[in-house]
Each structure stands twice: as structure tokens, then as C-alpha cells.
Image (tube, rainbow, N blue to C red):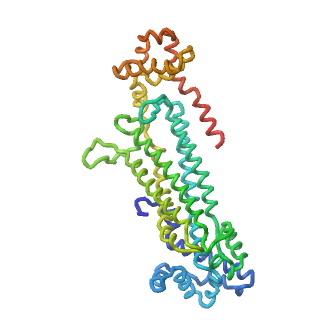
């Protein structure tokens, strides 16, 4: 991923230096197990550790000649370690190293992403509690529906990212496997106990059965979860973008003192961070399909998945890490425009109380279909003439024949729409 959308901690996981470091750890762990099983002489691991040095440029130079990355790596290590190097990789195949390492990199990345979500959850929770009873209009199809609270809006995101946290935890478990089973996965040339030892040493689980490669359904699941998290980020970003529109202006991204919104129009304050998040979400989701297509490999192994994973491994995790942190910044410092929330609530002059009138009429014995048409007639008249819905109802003799003036006033009570908010908050927050 380009520097603009990368953070150092996660980016470091995918750098060649770290990759080769893990390769060496896998090889040394396998060699250590072989020493214990008396398959290779004792002291090999100690000597290789003391003499080996990862030289990224040297490995690249060798690979340019041999056209094989693992052979290039082993050649580079052996050149430094001498004759003891010949015991590395005994009975193993390239995928044993590559797949175990890739899974470990995904696991390392996953833990960083979990931490990102944890921070985001704290920020969302804080905003949701702060605005628990901050009234605003709810919208369906982009049209004013009934009142809700901004805190409840935030609570939906809190619950969604809580689910994402659980999904990612499961995806990390799914991907945390180790395969040291040799060519075509039969253990013909490598003892299964070596795999068990390496898995324990690297804090991974043994892959129950591999076909020389770790089954790619595991990876498809992992990247699918990243795609779902990206979609949640986009849902949040779209909400901010819509609420920041001039016609709505209920919420704004933070805008720094010297920040400029437009190269041509000095008055602009654009929701660029949220728009950026929408774009990044598309990239992450775009990597899900290649991960799904990687599941179907030829026979025991081919490398059609390899070029894909060299791209989507770093790109998806680095991008998601950046996006989660950017969203956290937006949530922490977004500006709430209470006046415009109130202004928008009053925009339709009480039309959103139409359902209360409908329900009241049905409680008086009027058929729902009939009551609906009666209320709709008044609502559309109020909307067309831009007049108070309450006053329009007062002029309707049929409706007022069923509802008293005093009762009508009670039906226009904002508190009615917030009286169950606490129930929802308790339902969500008490289980956390």
C-alpha cells in the first residue's frame, strides 16, 4: 500500500526483513525439533543462530538468478552459516515455510486490527452515551421518518463494530495454523512431531490435513471478515457525509484551523475524511473476491494464489488499519450541530407524529385502512401548504370527532419517542 494510507506498525509486518525473519524462525524451530528427535546433529540450531544474518539485498540478488525465493533465502543463510546450513529445510517443502509465515503475518496483523477496533469502540461508546437523548430526526429512504436520538445512531455502530471484533477474533483463530508436512502433505520426509513442535513454538495450531498448502478457505474467511469490517466503516462514513450536507448540517468532521476545503471556493468544509474512508472500503472489499477464488487450487498445490496473496495480504490489512484509525479520529472529534438537529426536527411541522394519530384512531374502533387514509389526507395537505400538522388535524371534523383537543396535544409529545431508549442502551451495553 502507498505511504499515504499506511501506518508504520502494521506496514513493518509485511516488510521483507520481517518476512525473512519469520522464515528463519520457522526453519530454526523445525531444526530444533529435528535435533530433539535425533534426526540432525545437536548444535545445528545454535550455530545457525549465531552465524545467520538476513541480507534482503543478497537474497534478492540470488533469487534473480535461481528464480525461487525460498531457495534464494536458504542459499543466503547457508553462505553465512557454513556446513550446518545443509540441515535446514530437511524433508520440508517451500509451502511449509511460506504458508506458516503468511498465516503468522496475518495473525500479527489481526491483533493490531483488534486493537484498532477496541479503540474505536471506546470512542463510539463515549459519543453514544453523551448523546443518548440528543433528539434528531430519523430518516428512511432519505425522507424524514420519526424522531430518534443521535446517541442511538451511535449505538448501532457500537454494536456493529462489537460484532466485527468477534468476527475478527474468530478469523484470527481460523488462520492461525502451521503446516510442516512436506511435499503433497504426506509427511513422507518429515516427522509429524516436527510440525507439532513448530506450531507450539510459534503459537499456532497444527493444520489437521494439508495438501502441501494450507487450505485457502481459511484465508477466504479472514479476508471476507476484513471486507465486512470495511463495509461497516463505509456505513459510518456515509452517515457522516449525509449529515454534513449543507441542507442537513447536523454533524461535521473536525476542521483544523489552517485547513482548506477547496482550491477554488474558500467557504467549503468538505467531509473529505469520510469520503476517503468510503474509497478505502471499496479497495478492501475488492480483495475479498480474489481470496475466495484462491480456494480452488489444482490438485495438491499450484501457485495461482501466491501472486494474489502477496498483494492482498499487506494491502488489505494495512489499508484497514489506516481506515479504522482514521474513523476513530473522526468519531472522537466530530462536531454536533444541536441547533440544526432541532431545526430539522421542526422542518415538517410535526408530520412525524402521523403514526401516533393513526394508532389512536384505530384504538377508537376505526379500521386501519380507513384511519390511514384519514391521516394521510391531513399529512399531505400539511406538507403541500407547509402548515402545522397539528393545526391541520384540528380542522378535520372527522378526526376531531374521535380525538379530543387535549388528547391531540398529548399525542404530539417528543418524549414518547425516547421513552424506550434506555432499554436499548441497557440491552447493548450490559453484555459488554
Horizontal and vertical percent for residue 100? 60, 71
Q: Please, which residue is most extreme toward the bottom here?
A: 83
Horizontal and vertical percent for residue 278? 42, 50
Q: How many circles with numbers are drawn on the protein?
A: 0
Left or right relative to 76: residue 385: left
Horizontal and vertical percent for residue 431? 66, 42
Horizontal and vertical percent for residue 114? 57, 55
Q: Please, which residue is most extreme toward the left here?
A: 264
Q: Which quadrant would the N terminus be assigned to in this image?
A: bottom left
**Res 177 → quadrant:** bottom right
Q: Nearer the viewer, residue 267 or 19?
A: 19
Q: Which quadrant would the C terminus be assigned to in this image?
A: top right
Q: Is residue 231 above or below residue 249?
A: below
Q: Nearer the viewer, residue 12 or 397?
A: 397
Q: Is residue 261 above or below residue 143?
A: below
Residue occupying image coordinates x 54% and y 81%: 73
Residue occupying image coordinates x 38% and y 34%: 248
Q: Nearer the viewer, residue 266 or 302?
A: 302
Left or right relative to 257: residue 54: right
Residue 29 visible in the displayed image: no
Residue 309 visible in the displayed image: yes
**Res 346 → quadrant:** top left
Amino acid at each position: 500500500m502507498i505511504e499515504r494510507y499506511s501506518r508504520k506498525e502494521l506496514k513493518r509486518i509485511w516488510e521483507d526483513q520481517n518476512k525473512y525473519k519469520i522464515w528463519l524462525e520457522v526453519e530454526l524451530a523445525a531444526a530444533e525439533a529435528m535435533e530433539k528427535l535425533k534426526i540432525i546433529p545437536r548444535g545445528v540450531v545454535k550455530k545457525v543462530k549465531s552465524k545467520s544474518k538476513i541480507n534482503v539485498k543478497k537474497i534478492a540478488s540470488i533469487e534473480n538468478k535461481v528464480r525461487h525465493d525460498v531457495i534464494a533465502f536458504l542459499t543466503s543463510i547457508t553462505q553465512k552459516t557454513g556446513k550446518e546450513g545443509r540441515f535446514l529445510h530437511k524433508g520440508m517443502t517451500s509451502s511449509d515455510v511460506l504458508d506458516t509465515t503468511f498465516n503468522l503475518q496475518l495473525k500479527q496483523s489481526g491483533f493490531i486490527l483488534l486493537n484498532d477496533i477496541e479503540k474505536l469502540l471506546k470512542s463510539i461508546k463515549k459519543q453514544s452515551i453523551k448523546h443518548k437523548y440528543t433528539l434528531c430526526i430519523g430518516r428512511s429512504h432519505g425522507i424524514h421518518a420519526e424522531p430518534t436520538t443521535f446517541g442511538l445512531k451511535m449505538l448501532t455502530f457500537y454494536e456493529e463494530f462489537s460484532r466485527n471484533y468477534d468476527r475478527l477474533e474468530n478469523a484470527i483463530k481460523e488462520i492461525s495454523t502451521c503446516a510442516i508436512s512436506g511435499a503433497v502433505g504426506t509427511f513422507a520426509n518429515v516427522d509429524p512431531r516436527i510440525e507439532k513442535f513448530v506450531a507450539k513454538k510459534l503459537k499456532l495450531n497444527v493444520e489437521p490435513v494439508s495438501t502441501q498448502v494450507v487450505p485457502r478457505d481459511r484465508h477466504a474467511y479472514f479476508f471476507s471478515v476484513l471486507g465486512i469490517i470495511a463495509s461497516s466503516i463505509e456505513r459510518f462514513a456515509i452517515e457522516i457525509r449525509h449529515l454534513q450536507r449543507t441542507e442537513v448540517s447536523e454533524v461535521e468532521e473536525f476542521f483544523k484551523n489552517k485547513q482548506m476545503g477547496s482550491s477554488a471556493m474558500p467557504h467549503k468544509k468538505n467531509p473529505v475524511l469520510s469520503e476517503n474512508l468510503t474509497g478505502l472500503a471499496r479497495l478492501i472489499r475488492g480483495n475479498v473476491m480474489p481470496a475466495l477464488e484462491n480456494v480452488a487450487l489444482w490438485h495438491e498445490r499450484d501457485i495461482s494464489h501466491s501472486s494474489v496473496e502477496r498483494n492482498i495480504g499487506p494491502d488489505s490489512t494495512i489499508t484497514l488499519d489506516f481506515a479504522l484509525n482514521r474513523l476513530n479520529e473522526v468519531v472522537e472529534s466530530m462536531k454536533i450541530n444541536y441547533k440544526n438537529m432541532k431545526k430539522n426536527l421542526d422542518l415538517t411541522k410535526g408530520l412525524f407524529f402521523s403514526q401516533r394519530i393513526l394508532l389512536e384512531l384505530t384504538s377508537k374502533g376505526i379500521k386501519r385502512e380507513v384511519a390511514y387514509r384519514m391521516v394521510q389526507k391531513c399529512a399531505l395537505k400539511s406538507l403541500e401548504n407547509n402548515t402545522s400538522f397539528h393545526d391541520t388535524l384540528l380542522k378535520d371534523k372527522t378526526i376531531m370527532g374521535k380525538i379530543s383537543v387535549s388528547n391531540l396535544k398529548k399525542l404530539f409529545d417528543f418524549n414518547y419517542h425516547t421513552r424506550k431508549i434506555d432499554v436499548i442502551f441497557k440491552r447493548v451495553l450490559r453484555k459488554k
